Image (spheres, rainbow, N blue to C red):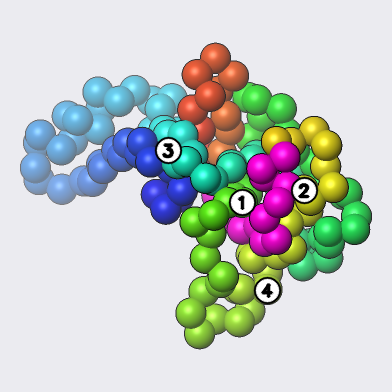
Amino acid sequence: STEVAGDVSYCVAYSGCDQSANSAQSSIGEGMKQIVPIGYPIEGNYLFVTEHTDLKANISILDNHLRILPDGEVGELMVVGEHLALGYHNNALSRTSRFVPNPLCDNDNVPAEARCYSMAFFTGDLVYRDASTGMFYWCG
């Protein structure tokens, strides 16, 4: 999700004979190995944590079945905004399953700016948003 989050941090951990790499992995802490901060949305983009579903192709602008999860709950990252691509190059199947008509167009519970974009992108990443900082974290 580096395309939509401007302040991105990475944790690179690998095994092998390099002791310094193994030490760095250990210093992260057991509970933090799979939670990586991905930052905040860049200007002109909106990130939402949504209920994970495999039925994205069936979500339309006219229905309101998409559930935006509250801060702290883990769900799938959805992106809308001015920097969103039109789809994957030469991959129509991914384009139709991940790039869908914006299901938030008629949702009064989200910022008006997020409703004006015609398309949304479901990244497939599991994330949560920290309520106290507003930062998004990748969980898998």
Task: Residue type at mark 4: give it.
Answer: Thr
Q: Amino acid at mark 3?
A: Ile
Q: Which residue is mark 3?
A: 38
Residues drawn in magenta: 112-126
Looking at the image, the residue that sits furthest to the bottom is 90
Neighbours of disc 2 within 10 Å: few (<14), some (14-19), many (20+): many
Residue pictured at 61% horizontal, 58% vertical:
121
Of tags 1 and 4, the one toward the viewer is 1
Which label belongs to residue 104? 2
Question: At label 1, which amino acid type do we have?
Answer: Val
For mark 3, give the secondary structure.
Answer: strand
Mark 2–mark 1 distance (CA, rounded to whole Å): 9 Å
Neighbor class of circle 4 (other Cα within 10 Å; few <14, some 14-19, many 20+) is: some
> Any magenta on residue 19?
no
Mark 2 or mark 4: whose residue is earlier in sequence: 4
Instruction: Report the front residue among 93 and 99.
Output: 99
Give the residue number, with chain letter if any, for mark 1. 80
Spatial separation of the CA atoms under disc 1 and disc 4: 15 Å
Residue drawn at the location 59% of the way across and 42% of the way down = 46
Would you name the residue on which mark 4 appears? 96
